[in-house]
């Protein structure tokens, strides 16, 4: 990350490096003597949570601005979806049957990356959660097309590393799910949701809630695999119960293929603002 601003004040990084070379004495070894911004134990205090939230918001924002990325296409989906080559080792028959969505995610990412390359990688840049499964497929497709892609990993109790297809300079790691989800949506031109688990459902329903309540502009929300989504969510029951409006069922579309999704993104015209402000 580069700082293009000119300031007459002494650079903080220079002071950090200078402080690391001071004489070793009981005073300089004391935690109280450490520079506050270079003190990892201090930054990890419970009371510093607001600062850490701000840092996670700023780091990603500044780096994407530095790379000139203005808009993204988001791919949500399960880490457990195997590639077709690996489907025989899937833990369930359903996962094996869902493996073709790995290839659809890969193909869709290639189609979006072609659009991104036409803009100099400023628009329609693919972003995933940076992990395996559908996420890996999205980053792989972008790499195969010769473009860049973003991976937003998060620290989990079990070890997780970015998949090898994320553009290294655009690989990020988060502590807070909330900030990570915010970054997924802040530049989104389209949201594509593949079969997945709790995390995918969380991301989908937060997106729909923000659009439903007018906190986010309408963008294409494309659910790959009608059969899967209708088997786990009774959408019509929500409408019939009155817990959502019938119009809320128009906030997303079912698609089956990369080509179908790409056509919707290509021809998307935002719907006019709704006259009602529906409740959740």
Image: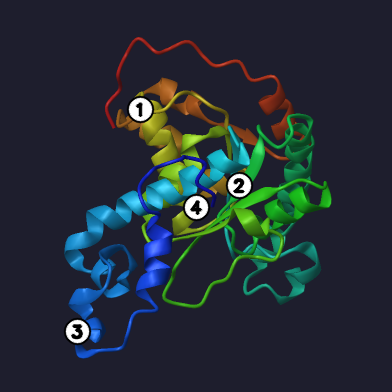
Where is residue 207? Give x, y as percent. Answer: 44, 38
Q: Can residue 147 be seen in this view?
A: yes
Q: Residue at x 47, y 27 (%)?
A: 249
Where is residue 7? Give x, y as percent. Answer: 40, 42
Between 54 and 262, the one lying in front of the other is: 54
Between 198 and 229, the one lying in front of the other is: 198
- In this rendering, is residue 73 above or below 57? above
Secondary structure under badge 2? Answer: strand
| Mark 3 or 1: the one toward you | 3
| Mark 1 or 4: the one toward you | 1
Q: Which numbered disc, 1 or 4, marks the residue that appears first in the sequence?
A: 4
Q: Which numbered disc, 3 or 1, marks the residue that appears first in the sequence?
A: 3
Kindly indicate whether the residue at mark 2 contacts the one at mark 4 (C-beta within 8 angstroms): no
| Residue 215 numbered mark, or none | 1
Q: Distance between the residues labelled 3 and 4?
A: 50 Å
Q: Distance between the residues labelled 3 and 1?
A: 51 Å
Between 266 and 81, the one lying in front of the other is: 266
- In this rendering, is residue 45 above or below 203? below
Q: Which numbered disc, 3 or 4, marks the residue that appears first in the sequence?
A: 3
Say which quarter of the image contains residue 137: bottom right
Q: State which quarter of the image contains the C terminus.
A: top left
Q: Which residue is drawn at 69% across and 54% down?
A: 139
- Mark 4: few/some/many CA within 10 Å (<14, 14-19, 20+): some
| Mark 1 or 2: the one toward you | 2
Kindly indicate whether the residue at mark 4 contacts the one at mark 3 (C-beta within 8 angstroms): no
| Mark 3 or 4: the one toward you | 3
Determine which residue is flagged by label 2.
Answer: 127
Determine which residue is flagged by label 3.
Answer: 27
- Mark 2: few/some/many CA within 10 Å (<14, 14-19, 20+): many
Determine which residue is flagged by label 4.
Answer: 200
Kindly indicate whether the residue at mark 4 contacts the one at mark 1 (C-beta within 8 angstroms): no
């Amino acid at each position: 990350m580069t700082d293009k601003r000119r300031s007459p004040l002494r650079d903080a990084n220079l002071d950090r490096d200078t402080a690391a070379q001071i004489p070793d004495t009981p005073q300089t070894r004391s935690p109280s003597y450490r520079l506050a911004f270079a003190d990892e134990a201090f930054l990890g205090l419970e009371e510093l949570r607001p600062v850490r939230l701000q840092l996670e918001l700023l780091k990603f924002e500044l780096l994407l601005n530095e790379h000139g990325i203005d808009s993204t296409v988001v791919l949500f989906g399960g880490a457990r979806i195997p590639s077709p080559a690996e489907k025989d080792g899937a833990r369930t028959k359903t996962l094996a049957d869902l493996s073709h969505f790995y290839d659809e995610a890969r193909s869709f990412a290639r189609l979006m990356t072609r659009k991104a390359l036409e803009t100099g990688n400023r628009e329609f840049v693919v972003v995933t959660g940076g992990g395996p499964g559908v996420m890996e497929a999205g980053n792989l497709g972008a790499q195969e097309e010769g473009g860049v892609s973003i991976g937003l990993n998060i620290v989990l109790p079990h070890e997780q590393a970015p998949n090898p297809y994320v553009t290294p300079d655009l690989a990020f790691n988060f502590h807070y799910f909330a900030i990570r989800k915010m970054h997924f949506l802040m530049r989104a031109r389209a949201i594509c949701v593949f079969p997945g688990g709790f995390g995918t459902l969380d991301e989908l329903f937060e997106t729909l809630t923000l659009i439903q309540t007018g906190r986010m502009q309408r963008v294409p929300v494309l659910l790959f695999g009608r059969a899967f989504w209708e088997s786990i969510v009774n959408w019509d029951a929500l409408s019939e119960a009155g817990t959502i409006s019938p119009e809320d069922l128009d906030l997303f579309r079912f698609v089956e293929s990369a080509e179908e999704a790409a056509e919707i993104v290509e021809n998307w015209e935002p719907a006019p603002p709704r006259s009602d402000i529906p409740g959740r």
